Amino acid sequence: MPAPATNAEPAPERTSLPDIFSTVHVSQSPKLWRRALGFLGPGFLISVGYMDPGNWATDLQAGSRYGYTLLFAIMGSNLLAILLQSLSLKLGIATGRDLAQACRESYSKPTSIALWLIAEIAIGACDLAEVIGSAIALQLLFHIPLIVGVLITSLDVLAILLLEHRGFRYIEALVMVLIGTIAVLFGIQVVLSKPEWAPILYHLFVPPKTVFSDPEMLYIAIGILGATVMPHNLYLHSSIVQSRSYPRTVPGKREAIRFAGMDSAVALMMALLVNAAILIVAAAVFHKQGHYEVAEIGDAYKLLTPLLGFAGASTMFALALLASGQNSTITGTLAGQVVMEGFLEIKLPGWLRRLITRLLAIIPAVIVTAIYGSTGTARLLVLSQVILSMQLSFAVFPLVAFTSDKARMGPFVNRLWLKIAGWSSAFLIAGLNAWLLLQIFHGR
């Protein structure tokens, strides 16, 4: 593992996460693969938000109810994610500013404060889903009461702090190990479930003709989008790509954008495989045997072992959930720091920022768990995804606008085709999420 660069550039004024700025060494070797290797990592930190516990319920419900039919929604959401994350990393590398800083510098103070509040609520909602997902996994594995599991999840803040003091590369390594764990566990389950590969390949690329005539199917498809494209990742990615030590010249930035884009695309394809695997397992195990209403994580856990006939199936499922929850809390707390510092220029100690973020998630989770038990936490998970859907457009529209601005981006401004793709994606996400919220508030 490369050590932090000893000749790292000093962090420029007003940069976010100054402690990690330009600290990860990037080889200047003439060999392309060695230079590319230095950029491996940030994309994987971002990808965990695309396979967090908030995704599991929608993927389980889609697979159990409609079989392989909604795989196209996972593929489409992933392609949107690759596009938006590429714009995010380009903004950070080209301008030296993250998305939150760019918003603060471009908009009025009231607008910036409003965007900060919306982003903080979204990060809290996302962290809430991770806390609940980890607590459910602890309950399934060790029979720990949910409320105790929620409290235990606060300890991961200490692990993050310890790793960060050793170097940002260690955090990236931990995340990549956890992603590998999730992928291996679900890969085994896919093999055990013996799916039908021809329908899988077909539905990955072809949407069903009934998707717009069946309101319930469309609702779940949009839910997959809402649970997949995470707004806090757009803020975070534009900041952590600046952790690399590369020449801050036009050719250096151009190469950094290319290699960081490759890292992001590979990592998000891994997220695609994990999400598709969850849906495939649900389709091959639950839908095939007539269990069409499996949406609760606990129900899936109970049914997997008897239906697959493999004693360790449920345990692997719960271990993957625990890895997913712990992985996502790392990026959630880092995103919270980027948003607060970027919008408000408030520099808090890392431990205090992480503690604030975690308390915002733990307090409502403890209250709801104590009052309603597992039923309440399931509702809270759904609510967290609705909040994320509401916030997404407030991050996407500024991102597309900034990266399409010649004065800001210089030679790295979006080309015409990219502007069209970016604005089309922004309006598509806004329209679909607006439809989703209308359906929720009108009881579908």
Image (cartoon, grey):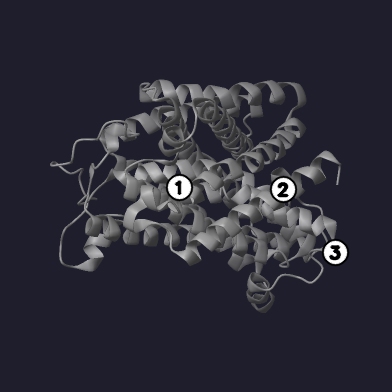
> What residue sits right under mark 3 in the picture?
213
Name the front one of labels 3 and 1.
Answer: 1
Type of amino acid at the residue the image marks with label 1: Phe
Q: CA distance from mark 3 to mark 2?
A: 33 Å
The tag earlier along the polypeptide, 3 or 1, is 3
| Most distant residue in the left direction | 7
Q: In front here: 378 or 139?
A: 378
Q: Which residue, given by chain and number where applicable, does mark 1 sit on?
A: 402
Q: Which residue is mark 2?
A: 302
Select label 3 or label 2 by which is in front. Answer: 3
Type of amino acid at the residue the image marks with label 2: Lys
Structural distance between the alpha carbons of marks 3 and 1: 37 Å
Where residue 200 sits: x, y (%)? 66, 72
Q: Secondary structure at mark 2?
A: helix
> Residue drawn 36% across and 23% down?
347
Left of 96 or right of it: where is 231? right
